[in-house]
Image: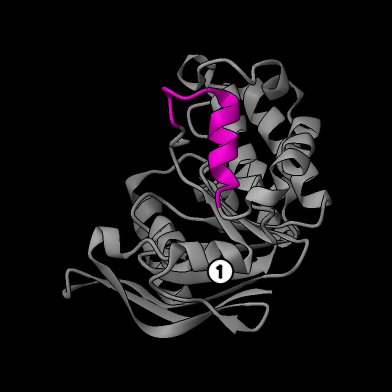
């Protein structure tokens, strides 16, 4: 299990961004993390994967464990070796390299299994096999997202962290990415899915968390979150939001937190 317990993160020794975050991703489960821009979702992923230093952030309290083992806080490579990989928002592929070269870079900590892992990701992403010698920067947006997913899988992660994988994609491609996440999960990989597309995320997750201003304010099975009035109104957009409604919701959020 990937477990975060009472985590606090501070930026620049001043700004308290995460305030006592606790969540868990079980083996072979999909867990959705919802929240508006600025809620702290990406900071949480950085904390898990050891990338806070780059952004002048620091874990000041709490613990993160992978299958009972504490993560090495300042060693992203060590965290990958423990079985945690991340697909960052914006894909972050190497545009000048070929598709295959990008994939091989994803396996740099496990070079002996490159051929076997290439076969696995090409089974999941046949379009990438067809484009394996193409320059990555010339792929479509959907193909680039597939490449980012496939590159992370080259490390054979037990847990995969996805930061807004549907961002900027057409609805048809969002459905394709959704199906690929399910297929990846069916191989036994646990998934922490950070998404603003709440409908997509909750439709495939077993559990969900809602994050506001650095805190978890709701923690329920995904099916219950889909039926929750607040979630439907403010994350699924099923009702109009007047200024009065927003103020009322803010009162409810304070109560929830």
User: Residue lying furthest front in this view?
Assistant: 112
Q: Is residue 104 one of those drawn in magenta? A: yes
Whether residue 139 is situated above or below residue 222 in the rendered picture: above
Position of 16 with respect to 106 (left or right) is: left
Q: What residue sits 64% from the left and 38% below the top?
A: 150
In the image, residue 187 lies at what x, y percent?
Answer: 82, 51
Q: Which residues are magenta?
A: 94-108
Foreground residue among 94 and 21: 94
Q: Quadrant of the C terminus?
A: bottom left
Q: Secondary structure at mark 1?
A: strand
Residue 85 picture quarter:
bottom right
Q: Which of the 4 quarters of the picture holds residue 228?
A: bottom right
Q: Is residue 93 above or below residue 161?
A: above
Q: Work out whether residue 236 can be spotted.
A: no
Asked whether residue 182 is in view, the answer is yes
Residue found 42% across the figure and 71% down from its top: 215
Q: Does 222 appear in magenta?
A: no
- Between 112 and 178, the one lying in front of the other is 112
| Left/right of residue 102 with respect to residue 188 in the rendered view | left
Q: Nearer the viewer, residue 234 or 208?
A: 208
| Residue wearing tag 1 | 218
Residue 49, x across and y down, in percent: 47, 63
On the image, the x and y values in percent for residue 251 come to 38, 68
């Amino acid at each position: 299990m990937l477990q975060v317990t009472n985590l606090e993160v501070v930026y620049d020794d001043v700004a308290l961004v995460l305030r006592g975050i606790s969540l868990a991703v079980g083996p072979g489960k999909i867990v959705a993390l919802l929240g508006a821009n600025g809620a702290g979702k990406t900071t949480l992923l950085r904390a898990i994967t050891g990338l806070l230093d780059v952004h002048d952030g620091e874990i000041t309290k709490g613990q993160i464990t992978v299958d009972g083992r504490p993560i090495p806080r300042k060693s992203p490579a060590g965290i990958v070796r423990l079985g945690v990989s991340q697909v960052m928002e914006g894909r972050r592929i190497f545009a000048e390299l070929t598709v295959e070269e990008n994939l091989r870079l994803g396996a740099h900590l496990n070079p002996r299994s490159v051929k076997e892992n290439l076969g696995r990701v090409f089974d999941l992403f046949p379009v990438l096999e067809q484009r394996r010698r193409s320059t990555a920067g010339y792929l479509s947006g959907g193909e680039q997202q597939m490449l980012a997913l496939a590159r992370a899988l080259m490390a054979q992660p037990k847990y995969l962290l996805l930061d807004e994988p549907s961002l900027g994609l057409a609805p048809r491609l969002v459905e394709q990415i959704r199906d690929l996440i399910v297929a990846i999960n069916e191989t036994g990989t646990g998934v922490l899915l950070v998404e603003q597309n709440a409908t997509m995320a909750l439709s495939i997750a077993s559990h969900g968390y809602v994050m506001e201003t650095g805190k978890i304010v709701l923690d329920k099975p995904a099916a219950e979150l889909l039926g929750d009035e607040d979630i439907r109104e403010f994350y699924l957009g099923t009702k109009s939001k007047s200024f009065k409604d927003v103020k009322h919701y803010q009162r409810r959020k304070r109560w929830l937190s």
